[in-house]
Image (cartoon, rainbow, N blue to C red):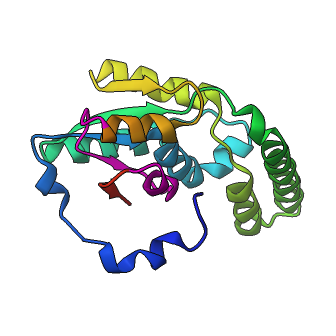
């Protein structure tokens, strides 16, 4: 997501730092980024309708990594869909459905590896998946926030207001929103 080509363009002002440099700080995390990565790792199960917690475990390992380095994570979740992005979301859903259909067709033919490739293109983070992660965060006493709409504006507000020392995401939009410390 984000602005195509922005990150390479800003390479000259990019600075690599070790996560330990943020020990004692709070970092806001774009939860859906981690959920998408976690879902990608278990796309086969998700597209088959099988029950899995792999995506939750993936996210909680990342949370623990931050905590082990002395960082307090603040997980920020997307809320409702933006009405102005309805057309884009409709097209994404269509592509995901088509990829899932192709994956199921390949699976019926016994081509599991190819099917998994299509499943990975079709997987989406559902409210149920976000809820499962929120339950795990509650159990681990990890703070979280659900943004009114997409998490970007909430993440930017938290960083710009000084409530957090930085943001962890994969979305270059945060730079456009004025964030100065964004970890990718």
- Tell me which segment is drawn in magenta: 161-178
Residue drawn at x 47%, y 49% is: 177
Which of these two is toward me, 159 or 134?
159
Secondary structure, magenta segment, majority class: loop
Q: Position of residue 2 (x, y in %)?
A: 57, 58
Rendered position, 77 above or below 165? above
Q: Does 169 appear in magenta?
A: yes
Residue drawn at x 61%, y 69% is: 4
Q: Position of residue 71 (x, y in %)?
A: 18, 42
Q: Position of residue 90 (x, y in %)?
A: 84, 43
Residue drawn at x 46%, y 39% is: 31
Left or right: 96, with 177 as reference point: right
Rendered position, 84 above or below 176? above
Which of these two is toward me, 106 or 167?
167
Rendered position, 35 above or below 161? below
Report which quarter residue 95 is drawn in: bottom right
Which of these two is toward me, 53 or 80?
80
Task: Look at the image and tell me in which quarter the C terminus lies.
Answer: bottom left
Q: Does 71 appear in magenta?
A: no
Left or right: 29, with 36 as reference point: left
Rendered position, 123 above or below 118? above
């Amino acid at each position: 997501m984000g602005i195509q080509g922005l990150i390479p363009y800003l390479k000259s002002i990019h600075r690599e730092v070790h996560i330990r440099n943020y020990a004692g700080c709070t970092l806001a995390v774009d939860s859906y980024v981690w959920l998408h990565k976690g879902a990608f790792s278990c796309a086969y199960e998700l597209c088959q309708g099988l029950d899995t917690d792999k995506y939750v475990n993936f996210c909680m390992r990342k949370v623990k990594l931050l905590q082990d380095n002395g960082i307090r994570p603040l997980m920020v979740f997307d809320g409702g869909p933006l009405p102005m992005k309805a057309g884009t979301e409709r097209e994404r859903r269509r592509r995901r459905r088509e990829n899932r259909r192709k994956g199921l067709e390949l699976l019926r033919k016994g081509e599991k590896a190819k099917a998994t490739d299509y499943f990975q293109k079709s997987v989406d983070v559902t409210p149920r998946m976000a809820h499962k992660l929120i339950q795990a965060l509650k159990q681990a006493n990890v703070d979280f926030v659900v943004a009114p709409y997409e998490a970007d504006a909430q993440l930017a507000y938290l960083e710009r207001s000084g409530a957090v020392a930085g943001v962890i995401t994969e979305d270059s939009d945060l730079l456009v929103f004025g964030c100065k410390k964004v970890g990718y």
